[in-house]
Each structure stands twice: as structure tokens, then as C-alpha cells.
Image: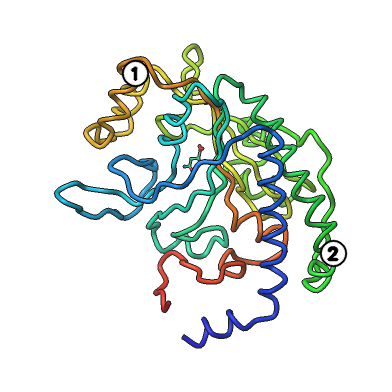
Amino acid sequence: MQHTIARLKDAKMTHILRIQSAALKAVHDYMYDSGVVQGMPVILSPETDPLNHPHFDASVDYYGQRLHLTKSMILHKQLSLLNGGFDKIYVMSPNVRLEQGELGQTGRHLFEFTQVDIELKEKTKTEFIGLVDGMIKNVFEFVMRECAADLDALGRKLTVPSLPLKVYESEELRSEYGDDFETIASAREADPFWVLNFPREFYDREDKQTRGYYHNYDIFWPEGYGEALSGGEREWEHDEIVRKMRERGTRMDAFETYLDVAKQGLIPRTVGGGLGIERMVRYLTGQKHVRDVTLFPRVPGERIDF
Ligand code: ASN
């Protein structure tokens, strides 16, 4: 409990929260000006992102139905674009991912966090990259203008990234730096940068001609801060989705409605991604761990006292 009290009383937290507020205002204003409508978060659902990596179950039984805490709103974002009246949506989406304890050390993981989750209909990854480049620039400009005193108090110097942010192929970085290319490139770059093609989830579109090439991407923060956003163009064809679920051993009965919509050929063709808010604030404020920018941090493997 003493840790929690000390963190809540820490003057540093005031600067961090002011910077976070400015960053979030810049995100909302940019989205509004770009015609992206805001949806509300889903917290419990029979269907959620399966996450293609080991983690613990976080679900409850409610009136005989198994409901999962949201791991990401990917599937809901996609289906929300069935509406013909808008073609861009974002959600400030809380996610619960009961990660294994080792991830508590990365500085980037909380088992409860929030992402700005964005999805665009009938757009390409190039258009998504352009939109997010602009959002990041807007955040830096606004935070640097509004929060100069807070940044000073934290001893943090920022520079507005030059656009377009650099884009690398993951293979290109792997051949230059080896398997740990994410860490090495993040430590070497001066501005945030994009990396394309990470074989990952069933919903990220795999190239039909060049099997194994994924039309997806991550953004990395520089100075060794690591992953900031992940996303991609999405699969929309039922048979491709089923094939990839089988490859990953995904339980198809946990995606009944999604697969039903896919079978009817109704999954919209979309592209999107989610940017971790705590990770962005950690970078902007120059803190060591996402726990340092969070009032009530949930760090993998650690007991929560409040
Ligand atoms: N938000 C991510 C996306 O849009 C998914 C995730 O967080 N796993 O691709």
C-alpha cells in the first residue's frame, strides 16, 4: 500500500497526467478533424481477439454465457464498419490481457491498458500510415506547446518527428540487425518509425500470392522505447480466415458470429491498428516503465494492492 500512496502523492505524476491529457486532446481533435467517428469501448463479449501468444484466461460466466474481457476490439471495430454512413472509427479501448509474469520486466507491458484503436474502410495501409503519421505529429506539437513546463520539470526534451515517418520492411531490418532487430532499430532511430510485415494474427491479411508476407505493420518509438502500435490490412474472405484459424489452432466455436458474418461475405475490407496510450505517455515523458505513468498500474506477475 505504501507504494501506491507514494505514487499517488508524487508530484511527478501531476506533470505526467498533464502531458497525457494534452496528448489525448490532440488525438481526439485530430480524429474529429479527420472525420473519424468515436465509438464506445466494449468490455465483455463472447468473441474477442484470440491473441496469438501464451496468456491466461480472463472470462466470466454470465447467465450461462461465457464472456471474455476484451483483449482488443479488433473484431468489433471491423464489424462496426458494416454501417454505410461512416467509413472511419476509433475507440479509446481498455484491454485486459493476463500476460505471463516475465513481461512485467519489459517496461512496456501492463495486463490492463488502453489503446487508441482505429479502423478505416476501403483504405490501404499507405492511407492508414498517412493518417497516423499526422496524428503523431499533432500530438508532439500540441504537447510541446502546451506542456513545456511539465516536460522541463521531468527533464524531457522532445523534437517533432519529420514526416513521413520512415518505413522499413521487417526482413530488411532482420538481415541488418538479426532477430533482435526491434530493440536495436528502436535504440538507433531518432524518430518513431514503421516496420512492415509481421506474421501474426488470423485477421491480419496475408498476401495470397506470396504466402508468408503479411500486409501489416508496427510503429516503434525511438530511444529504445520499442513497440508503439500494431495493425494491418485485414482478411475479409471466410475461407482465408478459417484456414488461418486452423493453422493457429484457434477454437472456431469462440467466433460464431464473426464467422457467420464472414460466411455471408459481409466482413468489410478494412485497415487499422491500435496505439498503446501508456506506451505513448511513457515515451513522451521519458519514463522507464509504463507503471511510472499509470495511477493504478497492473504489471504482469505483480500483486495489485488497490
Ligand atoms: N489493435 C490491434 C489492431 O488493430 C490489435 C491488437 O491490439 N491485438 O490490429
Q: Is residue 17 above or below residue 225?
A: below
Task: Name which quarter of the figure residue 161 lies in.
Answer: top right
Earlier sequence position, callout 1 versus callout 2: 2
Above or below residue 19? Residue 133 is above
In the rendered structure, which amino acid carries the disc numbered 1? His
| Rendered image quadrant of residue 111 | bottom left
- In the foreground, 189 or 116: 116
Q: Give the numbered dot on residue 238.
A: 1
Q: In this orientation, which residue lies closer to the viewer: 169 or 10?
A: 10
Residue at 38% from the left image edge and 18% from the top image edge = 266
Q: Residue at x 72, y 71 (%)?
A: 15
- Farthest top residue? 209
Residue at disc 2, secondary structure = helix
Question: Going by the image, does 16 lie left or right of 245?
Answer: right
**Residue position marked by numbered label 2 in the rendering:** 148
Is 222 on the left-hand or right-hand side of 104?
right
Mark 1, secondary structure of its residue: helix
Nearest to the eye among marks 1 and 2: give it. Answer: 2
Q: Count the marks: how many?
A: 2
Residue 108 on image: x %, y %: 56, 58
Image coordinates for residue 139, horizontal then vertical, percent: 74, 49
Identify the residue at the far left of this view. Answer: 64
Quadrant the C terminus occupies? bottom left
Q: Is residue 163 above or below residue 243?
A: below
- Three-letter amino acid code at disc 2? Ala
Side (left or right) of 65 relative to 279: left
Is the residue indicated by label 1 positioned so its CB lies within 8 Å of ligand 1? no
Badge 2: how crowded within 10 Å, few (<14), some, or many (20+)? some
Q: Residue at x 39, y 74 (%)?
A: 303
Label 1 vs label 2: CA separation? 50 Å
Residue 46: which disc?
none
| Left or right of 124 in this view: 305 | left
